[in-house]
Image (cartoon, grey):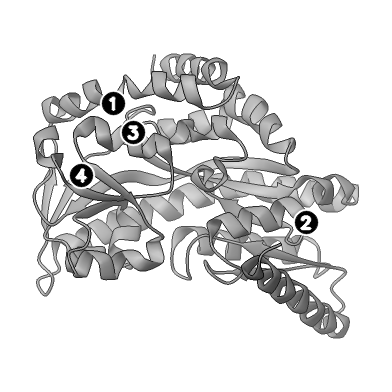
Amino acid sequence: MNLKKSLLLITAISMAFFLAACGDDDGAEFQWDFVTEEVQGQVQYEYAAEFAERMAEKSDGRVEITVFEYGGLGDGVDQAEQLMDGYTELAIVSPGFTGTMVEEAQLFALHFLFPDDIALTQQILDESEALNVELRAKYEEHNMTPLAFWTEGAMQWTGSSPLRTPDDFDGFQMRIQESPLISNSYQAYGADPTPLDWGELYTSLQQGALDGQENPIFFIEDAGFHEVQDHMTVSNHNNYVAMTVVNTDFYNDLPDDIREMVDETVEEMRSVGFEMQDQMNEELLTAIEEDTENPTEVYYLSEDERQAFRELAIPVRQFFIDNYGEDSGRILNMLEEEIQAAQQ
């Protein structure tokens, strides 16, 4: 174990002892950690906080959940590993951070895969057998059980220059998550994709070390990326999908009544989480458009303009099938059929 992971483990164990001591005073029978990849005020954190509140109420105080912001127990990869190893109980995980464990989950990085209709996309995420059965089984091989897949909204581009055609991406330094598949997608547009932790992104954009990035609108505004980018393109080229994940052994060992409360709360949070992201994305788009101190040109791609990107993105699906797990083609084909059926 390297020094970084040793320190993280010591921190996690120390926090566990601290919470246990606190728990002795308030009588909580179950004390769990719920880690997120965002900070207070952003969708994932607020989702987890609401989840914790509902569990405390349902259990009459028997369940106490501590919610951690991004960075509280390491980066996204660290958090996924801690969940897998049982140091934490619950997490909201982006598939991109688990792509080395479950290669098939990288399918969420494919551009123009899901419908433009966000509500229909959420319906597919809720009902898809490809995701909730096949992909879930892949995660459970690593002691992680996805209880729900849910969207945080459509992804948009910001840039130091306009992004309206694939030619605009020629040589464009695009920040991405660490993923060869995402890299391949932007190379198909002619960009120069650069992996970088989002905690370093604001400064890199401000200093001109990178030209642009992609994220849902709520995250762009809340992280202030529009303050250091002159242009935002409403491209809807992808959906930012998150997973509510539980450690499999922990989940299976829960008393039946507590596990039923968890399942019930997960179901309730499907609509709650959707409303959270919908409201945040709508309100913060208005905030960006009306921010006179940090003026950002907001441009909406036409369907013809989006089609030019779609035509370059479709061939990347074969790259995914060829490189991302023995079941990648089967799971992707299942999902594409489900998407087609839902659209019809």
Which numbered disc flags the more N-terminal residue, 3 or 1? Answer: 3
Residue ID at (46%, 59%): 43
Which numbered disc flags the more N-terminal residue, 2 or 1? Answer: 2
Which numbered disc flags the more N-terminal residue, 1 or 4? Answer: 4
Pointer 3 and pointer 1: residues touching (CB < 8 Å)?
A: no
Query: How far across and how far down the image is residue 298, in percent?
Result: 12, 52
- Identify which residue, 204 or 23, lies in the foreground: 204
Gap in angstroms between the C-alphas marked 4 and 3:
21 Å
Gap in angstroms between the C-alphas marked 3 and 1:
9 Å
Q: Amino acid at mark 2?
A: Gly
Gap in angstroms between the C-alphas marked 2 and 1:
37 Å
Q: Amino acid at mark 1?
A: Ala
Helix, strand or loop at label 2? It is loop
Q: Which mark is residue 313?
A: 1
Q: Amino acid at mark 4?
A: Val
246 over 45 or under it: above or below = above
Q: Nearer the viewer, mark 3 or mark 1?
A: 3
Q: Which mark is residue 324?
A: none
Q: Quadrant of residue 61?
A: bottom right
Pointer 2 and pointer 1: residues touching (CB < 8 Å)?
A: no
Return the residue at label 2. Answer: 86
- Identify which residue, 111 or 263, lies in the foreground: 111
Helix, strand or loop at label 3? It is helix
Pointer 3 and pointer 2: residues touching (CB < 8 Å)?
A: no
